[in-house]
Image (cartoon, coloured by chain):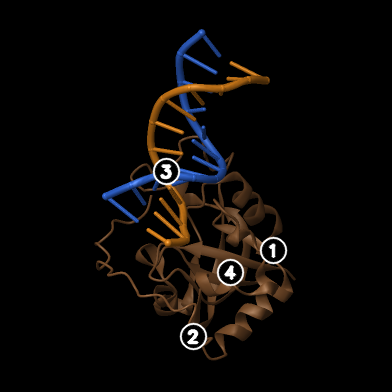
Chain colours: A brown, B blue, C orange
Amino acid sequence: MRHWLLKNEPECFSIADLEAAPQRTTFWDGVRNYQARNFLRDDFQPGDLAIYYHSNAEPSAAVGVVKIVRAGYPDHTAQNPKGDHYDPKHTALNPIWYMVDVRHVETFPRIVPLEEMRKVPELKGMELLKTGSRLSVMPITKAEFDKLVKLAHSPAPTPTAAAKKPQPKKKPAAAKSKRS
DNA sequence: GCCAACGTTGGC
DNA sequence: GCCAACGTTGGC
């Protein structure tokens, strides 16, 4: 059994949306990157667990756990010319893009922000933390998975005086259209 | 909003 | 097959 990290913008589909979905399950569609596709098509297995990560969020953070309930199969949203994820090169006979089904397992009692993850030695090796990392589907180790779950069930770290910075004023997030 | 980093495209 | 231009991602 493998462990994964799945990234999505909450404006697009948040973990709350997944929790509210029928059977608390959805297909993880719209991945249009070959490296991520290979993971989805070749390596995801039912029973695998994944960290749900909110990107472009305030703050960006690990927010929960999902379980893979169906292995990779062709992403039919690539065949919808009206959809955001249309790709004319993808056909039913020669599929290019794949998706998996995921089911909600847990919404963390405390989210683990990216900023906090960067400070945890056990998480140093994660692809997510690398500069310029844009993969939306990536493997993580069991140790990394367990550490994130443990952090999410522990109190927030108390910032030291030195680490405390005045928070710059933030504008409320503008309404965003669904990501393409 | 800015912009660095990245993947993809297309001219040659 | 190179690589510059382009579009996108995503933290800040």
Q: Given the image, on which type of amino acid does mark 3 rest? A: Tyr
Q: Residue at x 73, y 75 (%)?
A: A143
The label shown at residue A125 is 1
Give the farthest residue toward the front. A162
Quarter of the picture containing the N terminus of chain A is bottom right
Numbered disc in front, either 3 or 2: 2
**Mark nearer the N terminus (3 vs 1):** 3
The label shown at residue A110 is 2
Q: Which residue is mark 3?
A: A86
Q: Please state which of residues A179 and A18 is positioned toward the viewer in this rendering.
A: A179
Q: Given the image, on which type of amino acid does mark 2 rest? A: Arg
User: Is residue A85 rendered to the left or right of residue A173?
Assistant: right
Q: Secondary structure at mark 2?
A: strand
Disc 2 and disc 4: Cα gap in Å? Answer: 17 Å
Q: Which residue is mark 4?
A: A118
User: Is residue A13 rendered to the left or right of residue A113?
Assistant: left
